[in-house]
Image: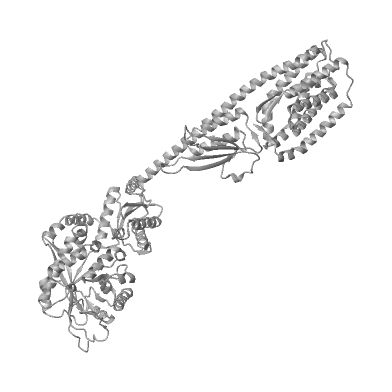
Amino acid sequence: MTPTPTSETDWRLRPIVGLLSFAAAISVVGAVFNLPPVTSPGWLTLITITTLICLSSLLKIRIRPRFSINWTDSAILLAAATLPWQWTVTCVALGVTIAKVAQRREAIKSAFAVAKEVLVATTAGLILAPTAVESLTTRSQLDHFPRIEMLALAFVAMILVDELLSVPVIAISAGIPVLRMARDSINRHLLLSMIHFAVALAALVLLLWDSRLLIAVPPLVLSLHFMHMNRLRQEAEREAWQRLARATDALNEVDLDKVLRAAIDTGVNMFRAAWVELDFRMPAEPGEPAVLRQVVGDRTGLLPARSAFAVSEGEPTIVALEGQRDTEDVGELRLYFTRPTVLAEREGFLLQTFAAALATAIRNASAYGLLINVADQHAREATHDPLTGLANRRRLVHEGSAAFEQHPAGGAIALLTLDMVQFKEINDGLGYTAGDTVLVEIGRRMLATAGADAIVARQDGDEFAVLFTALPTPALAMHRSRDILQKVAEEYEVDGVPITLVPRAGLAVAQADGDMTELLRRASLALTEAKRTGQRIVPYSRSLDVTDLDRLELGGQISRAVAASEFTLEFQPIVDLATGEVVSAEALARWHHPDRGNLDPRRFLDAVERSGQLTAFTEAILDQALQAAGSWAAAGHPIPVAVNISPRSLLDRRFPALVKQVLDERGMKSESLVLELTESLTLSSLEIVDQVLAGLGQIGVAIALDDFGTGFSSLSALARVPVRELKIDRSFVTDMDASAEAMAVVRSTVELGRALGLSVVAEGIERVDQRQTLWNLGCGLGQGHLFARPLSQQRFLASLGKGAFGDMIEGRQAPVVRLPRAGEHFGLRRRPRSGNE
């Protein structure tokens, strides 16, 4: 590399060079005005020595970018040992000046070189002046050979002066620390200085033996110079290729960051750049564009941005990182120097070779990194749910098995499994995108609530799990599970639609000798029981093992039971709380199982919904209910019958047609049928449900909202759904005397029904005081054991013939406000009330 001085460097060097030139000028003037006389043979000696000095200054070998050697110090020592110091200084000034003019160097460099050599010659001449040879002759004067210690002292002084003068100037010019420059210079010049001293001694022996041999010194010096230059060049070539080999070896890494650090280090240390920029394209996955990346660094390593550097003068040295064959280049490597620099031919070739190796290394490391990323991605996909990012069932089982193997003493392992009631309706009504959004939010909430020591997993669909490990006590599992369920049950909003989910969960605590497979089975049993009973969370117990087998067996018998008409109905009257008169009846399904006897609906309804026989079951129940209503009407008691409908039936667009078909087959009017639906905000938010309800409304079938107050209904939902009746859940009726909250629910429901023109029915009335309280609140209708337990069709008909199911309330005329509705309660014609009613 051939650096050229910048303007800033010139201004910094000019005072130093000027001072040195001034000192050298004083030395030259002093020598010229005190030159001793020269004899005729002496002029030949002076001319020869001056020529020798000029030639030695011209013969320079560059061995490193900032290091070069010449023979000037040998020639100066020879002159100082054979000439008076005045002629030594004069010959050195003249010979070096001629050499620099011939080289056409910059003025500041030429001035510095002449001044330095003059001051070095002055130092040597003054030291050797007392021992200098008076005159050279053709006779041997070896007996007048200067003392070797004086010659060594003079040479050491020359080297020190040379280093003191040149090192700071070169360091400032190159922009590197002075101490570092001095250390490198001494290491490079120590051996060469000893060689130059030996050459000077040999030349001095020849001169003292016969001065005519002085003419042979320049050819000898030339020969030695070219021999030494050739050897140094060979060593430099060998060292350069060794450094290149080490640099390319450093690129044999699969870690891209290590490759980049090696590239920066080579650019700075091998090519002496101030800093290095590297732009390259990283390969991407198929179908994805290549990623552009830039790294910057200096001798300290990788740097965050180029803004950390001052802008260099001149253009950077740029080399392309070529692609293979006809492929696009990988990128380019840019070397920045603190001063404009031109690479030598050999260094340029080394840089090209290094760039080719770097391009290959970047391709290989990038491809390896891409393979690692793909492998990591596949490994993650194998253990994580792609939608929520949670662990999947595979990882849950793996982590659970590992937890059992490393089970800490005194710690407990527990598994919570949960899913969302009627989550399928969200997918069917709002679309799978909305469902996915809700699933992601469920996972986020569970992850934030479960704690760092728990593993949250999505097993399948809307079923999630939380594995607790190393719990201090088993009881803590229930506490943490309730926190998770409470968070999951909070309201969601998707595309402006508010959604409230009802989670059901099962919790199993592992035994000391248990395993993950058994823990999963127990948690699944507990979850199934929670969904069957409607409880929010059910802990595992041994009784669930028998219950689950029983449920599986029942599920397999549903189809046979429907075909064999094993499902029958019992009826409970709905009465006017004021008079006890029957206004309608609720049909309650029973399964007369041939082996198990009469089964309560809680034992088999879940199995029916999961068996795929829901439509057939519903048709059979509707048919029996309408057949009973027809028999009552034929006997003079035209009261409607209410039938509980599964929420899943509202997802079947064919359901309104099924209802109309049964009505037509039994010859019944739509006013004779009431469909009771469980309150659910999730259902009322779905388009398909609205369509089914609208279809039922077109038929004229009345809709009653069962268990009102236990779900998540809103006024907007009630306004959209064609509801004609609200039924207060039995739990509020039971607790209203002892609970202010229950009483508030009952009162608000009655007032809401009055405001919307809806009938209000209180369920679960068992005591007279409850009937009286409800009547006082303005509730007109009720049902419960106070009036009658569920009866068979025949017994219910017989009871209708006996009249009212209860006595008339005394003083009933004040609180009740009759609601205007056609045909009284869903078409039942009532007798006119007397004036005191």
Asked if residue 586 shows in the view, the reply is: yes
Residue 247, position as x, y percentages in the image: 55, 31
Residue 91, position as x, y percentages in the image: 82, 23
Task: Check the image and tell me how it is coloured.
Answer: one colour
Q: Nearer the viewer, residue 817 or 769?
A: 817
Q: Nearer the viewer, residue 184 or 439?
A: 439
Where residue 75 sits, quadrant-wise, is top right
Quadrant position of the N terminus in the picture: top right
The image shows residue 467, relative to residue 823, as above or below, that is above
Q: Is residue 189 left or right of residue 374?
A: right
Q: Is residue 225 left or right of residue 83?
A: left
Asked if residue 301 shows in the view, the reply is: no
Quadrant position of the C terminus in the picture: bottom left
Which residue: 15% across, 80% down? 804
Which residue: 32% across, 58% down? 431
Residue 707, position as x, y percentages in the image: 26, 70
In the image, farthest residue toward the top: 139
Which residue: 24% across, 86% down? 813
Q: Is residue 700 left or right of residue 167?
A: left
Which residue: 32% across, 49% down? 393
The image shows residue 346, relative to residue 605, as above or below, that is above
**How many numbered discs?**
0
In the image, farthest residue toward the bottom: 835
In the image, farthest residue toward the front: 326
Where residue 188 sits, quadrant-wise, is top right
Residue 192, position as x, y percentages in the image: 69, 23
The image shows residue 183, relative to residue 645, as above or below, that is above
